Image (cartoon, rainbow, N blue to C red):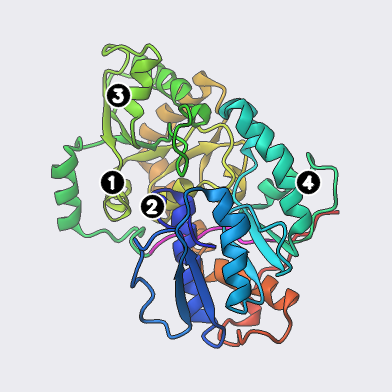
Amino acid sequence: MARAIDQADGLGRYCEQVLRQLLILDPQTRYIIFLRTDATGGRWREFANAQTCIIHSPGKLVWDQLLVPAAARRLGVDLLFNPKFSLPLLSRIPGVFVLQSCDWYVNPQNYPWWDNIYIRLMLPLYCRKARGLLGISKTTLEALASRIAMTLPVTGITYAGVGPEFTELGDPEAQQRCRAEYRLPARFILTVARVVHTGHRGLPDYPGGNNERLLRAYRLYRQRTTQPLPLVVAGRDVERYLRARGFSADQLQGVHFLGFVPNERLAAVYQLADCFVLATLFESFGLPILEALATGCPAIVPATGAGPEVAGSAARLIDPYDEGGIAAALLEVTGSPGLRARMAHAGILRARNFSWRQTAERVLAVFDELLPGASATTTAAPATRAPYWRTR
């Protein structure tokens, strides 16, 4: 169920990369890829085991609950997999979905009231329907298990990976083109910000990025040093969001807004930055954290959510509610070339623990448990399969 594959966010990348690796690792199994549009037509034509089925629908609920299960039954599907939470409730075909976030339960203020009601009504039903439940991180599954009074189905942790473009070995020419295109300063601090609900239309702005506190912390940092580095912000509509919340030109001094930056350019921005800072309130995984680590960009990340689970000891952890603490971390990291070098090395080593191949292998392990003998996954070495984490 790949309708999220063209979202310009981490979920879209997860869907795209995991599907590609499944097709590589499991060539004996037929994969039918259900889409709402033909925007991705031809993307998998090199795979003999891939079949695309485009199902047009005016709404996501109709697509999920009526049209996909009808097409799946007609095509003889044995197992439905949705990289995003939801499954057809009336279908007899067993299903697996990935819990990509638990933010509705942890920070319900980030969503409109009706969205919170929908999640609290529907997510437990999807969990009961699922034959297998995968989490993007242990933190996310634990957060859900502590808030839903039910036994979760067989569970595993998939984590996410990082694309080959996110490496410490950057192309100097590509970096210079990127610097010229975005008018990047000679030295800068980088953050990747989110202020919109990706994949949804008509929703209000998303406040969970904690951008207001980060900007106030950056102002404290500027006041505490004689040579402050500019703050470069990558993300759609961030300047509009901050100005709508009362930030003046003086309060945004030293801040450079890039807007949306595609992946192939974003990797070069990480490589050029002195350090990366993320101050979000709750990351279910935090793909920007992994991207920074993989590119050797010293990372300052939240101690909340999955930040410590992803970064381990390779990043400087901060309390995202403590503006003074964020400013102190910026001063510490930007002021010490030796510290940045140690953090860069540690981040590169840490990022090697994550790959899209490993993510797909963990997904396949659940498929094999639910449908033993139905797929040929001998190309995925059993030794690399991650052990399950199960709810009690």
Look at the numbered disc 4 and give the secondary structure of its residue.
helix
- Mark pair 4, 3: CA separation: 43 Å
- The first of marks 3 and 2 along the sequence is 3
Look at the numbered disc 2 and give the secondary structure of its residue.
loop
Q: Nearer the viewer, residue 224 or 56?
A: 56
Instruction: Give the residue displayed 41% in from the left and 35% down from the top.
Output: 193
- In the image, taking residue 141 as reference, residue 28 lies left or right, namely left
Q: Are marks 1 and 3 in contact (CB under 8 Å)?
A: no
Q: Can residue 367 be seen here?
A: yes
Q: Name the residue beneath numbered marker 1.
A: 269
The image shows residue 104 at horizontal and vertical percentages of 64, 35
In this rendering, the count of numbered labels is 4
- Mark pair 3, 2: CA separation: 21 Å
**Mark whose residue sits in front, 1 or 4:** 4
Q: Hey, what amino acid is under mark 3?
A: Pro
Q: Which residues are magenta?
A: 156-163
- Quarter of the image for residue 26 reads bottom right
Q: Name the residue beneath numbered marker 3.
A: 228
The numbered mark at residue 145 is 4
- Mark pair 1, 2: CA separation: 12 Å
- Mark pair 2, 4: CA separation: 34 Å
**Mark whose residue sits in front, 4 or 3:** 4
Q: Nearer the viewer, residue 378 or 337?
A: 378
Look at the numbered disc 3 and give the secondary structure of its residue.
loop
Instruction: Give the residue displayed 40% in from the left and 22% down from the top.
Output: 215
